[in-house]
Amino acid sequence: MKTNPENSFSTTGKIGKSLLLLLPMTLLIFILSTGGKPNFSSQVSLIAFLITFFFFNVLFFMILYKGKVDKYRAVGFILLALFFALTFIVDLISMRGTMTFNNETALACEIPFCHIVTTMIILPVIISGSIIFPGSIIGGFASITSMLVIVIGVMIALGRGFCSWGCFYGGWDDGTSRILRKPVIKKVNPAFRWASFAVLIIVAIMSLLLVGPFYCDWLCPFKTVTEFEKVTSFTVLLKTISFISLFAALVIILPLLTKKRIQCTTFCPMGALCSLSNKINVFDVSIDKEKCNDCMLCTKVCPTMSLEKQDVEKGKPSITCMKCGKCIDSCKRGAINYHIKGTPVGKRLTLARMLFLYPAFTLLVVFTSGTMQQGIVLLVKLFTTGSLLK
Amino acid sequence: MGQGFILGLSTGAVCVAYCGPVLIPYLMSESGGLKKSYLLVAIFLTGRLTAYLLTAILAGIIGHAVVQQTESRTFIMGFAYMILSALLIAYGLYRFKEICLGKTVKKMPESQNSQKRLLIPFTGGFLTGINICPPFLLAIAGAIDSGTIAGSVLFFVAFFAGTSIFFLPMPVAGMFKRQHVLRIIGKFAALLAGFLYFYKGLILLIR
């Protein structure tokens, strides 16, 4: 079969350009996957590193070569959620012998601090100067300081991009929302994109009033796949029912039926906080009105309902946009792109795209590489010894 | 107090969104810039606070003299919380034609007397304050539950603080563009507050 030499040259050129753009990321992936000091204690850990290293290089290469963002981002993002849950649960059971915690664990300040807690400590810190969370301030397992530094840094750098590139829970409903090819519930009221702001308000104030992390205590669906309080009373039983039913409804069933990231869009207070950070962040997504033919395909695929007809008319999504890239991938006319605020829309598209993709993908590697390697080691252990525990 | 604040937050956004379109044009039509606008908002809020304080005293008297003396107090309050929170949940879920008593200020005759003119925002504030809506009814229940006049007043002061947050940006023009968003957030906040009170009522009934 003959190939058109022009096409062949063009494909080779595209591969070369993609490989060139991949090089800095390859270096970053190596550094982030090894912590800068390659030291493999066993053959299995070396294999885990090689798989992780190869996986991220292929992923970023495909983003560059195919020009699709969301399709490849989602693979890494969903794996992050799954490997995080696996390694976290195994770590907990290895350390405590159980997924549950009790008063002693809380009093010893051994509860890992996740980024969602940020929304609950703001008001108490401002008003009373105290941190209402039984975690370690510095050092130890998921300390408060390290998580706050990461979260604030990422919010400044990527805005709500954090919810699609770094959150270790987001991959759950991102994954379930992709299982069906077509949504069963075809239209979700776009007003729901503002619901997380109400959750943020209520959660922040209730945490101040109760002097405790209200969302973690009562509402967090991800307690189901991380850690939860030992059932010792009727109140704790109610909490456990709340966690499991919210997980089933918001993370599994509704995303499956609607093809929207329902938990992230409607119920995550951190999502609302990150949305506000979209205001100060330099990156956004813009729609070139000269290219747009108002097909509204982007409004149908947006997993967070951040693109409605009025937003397309305005030429940008609402502040709830997670910068996942799904609308960019879906636009057949190439009218939607990552954009640097203050620059003309539709100009220097590759530059804006690359300036966003490098830090965003780096964030994905930061959160996923270690977890993925640890997860692979655990899976190998499961197959060879029949046990996941360390 | 905290519960009063949460309730206030859940109703404040809706108050601004529904009563605002009637009251804001009046407040804005008064020339004198931002300073004057804030003065009018302050008078408007004083009207609301007056309404709340009167309601609080009444609720405190009922709570102290009647409900606290009843043996089945826990059952009454639990039942009241559950019914009113169910109303609040319905209020958060569905669109009702809002009845805003504050709208009556629109019909008031204009006066050249400056003192009388100041009565208009005060009356508007007072009337929006005693507007019967699920959050307000739940606030009355919460105030009665506190059992003392002082507790009831504190509850309503917190309720007032919660609602006032939404009125403070009124004179800043940019805020008006987002009224529909505020209304939606307020509705969702009402829904969540409804669930919290439903749980409180359930726990009281189980006990």
Image (cartoon, coloured by chain):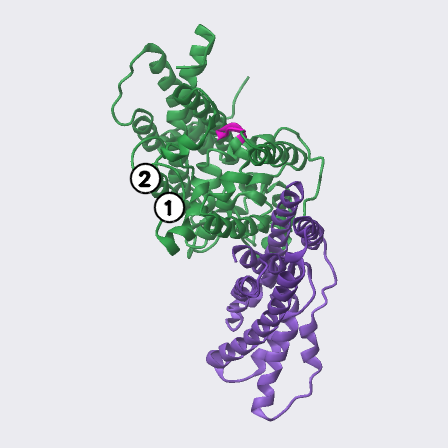
Could you say which quadrant of the image residue A289 lies in?
bottom right
First reached walking from the N terminus: tag 2 or tag 1: 1
In the picture, the disc for residue A137 is 2
Percent x, y of residue A353 = 43, 43
> To which residue does mark 1 refer?
A131
Q: Amino acid at mark 2?
A: Ile
Query: How many other residues sit within 10 Å of disc 1, few (<14), some (14-19) or many (≥20)?
Result: some
Q: Are marks 2 and 1 on the same chain?
A: yes
Q: Amino acid at mark 1?
A: Ile
Residue located farthest toward the right when viewing the structure as drawn:
B97
The residue lying toward the viewer, choosing from B169 and A40, is: B169
* Residue B72 versus residue B124 in the image, above or below: above
Residue numbers of the magenta segment: A224-231
* Residue A237 versus residue B65 in the image, above or below: above
CB under 8 Å between discs 2 and 1: yes
Percent x, y of residue B79 = 70, 49
Percent x, y of residue B182 = 58, 60
**Looking at the colours in the rendered structure, which chain would you say is drawn in green?**
A
Q: Secondary structure at mark 2?
A: loop
Percent x, y of residue A1 = 55, 17
Q: Residue at x 35, y 32 (%)?
A: A25
* Residue B126 versus residue A336 in the image, above or below: below
In the picture, the disc for residue B50 is none
One can see residue A278 in this view: no
Residue located farthest toward the top when viewing the structure as drawn:
A384
One can see residue A345 in this view: yes
- Compared across the picture, whether B103 is left or right of A118 comes to right
The residue lying toward the viewer, choosing from A58 and A385, is: A385
User: Chain B drawn in what color?
Assistant: purple
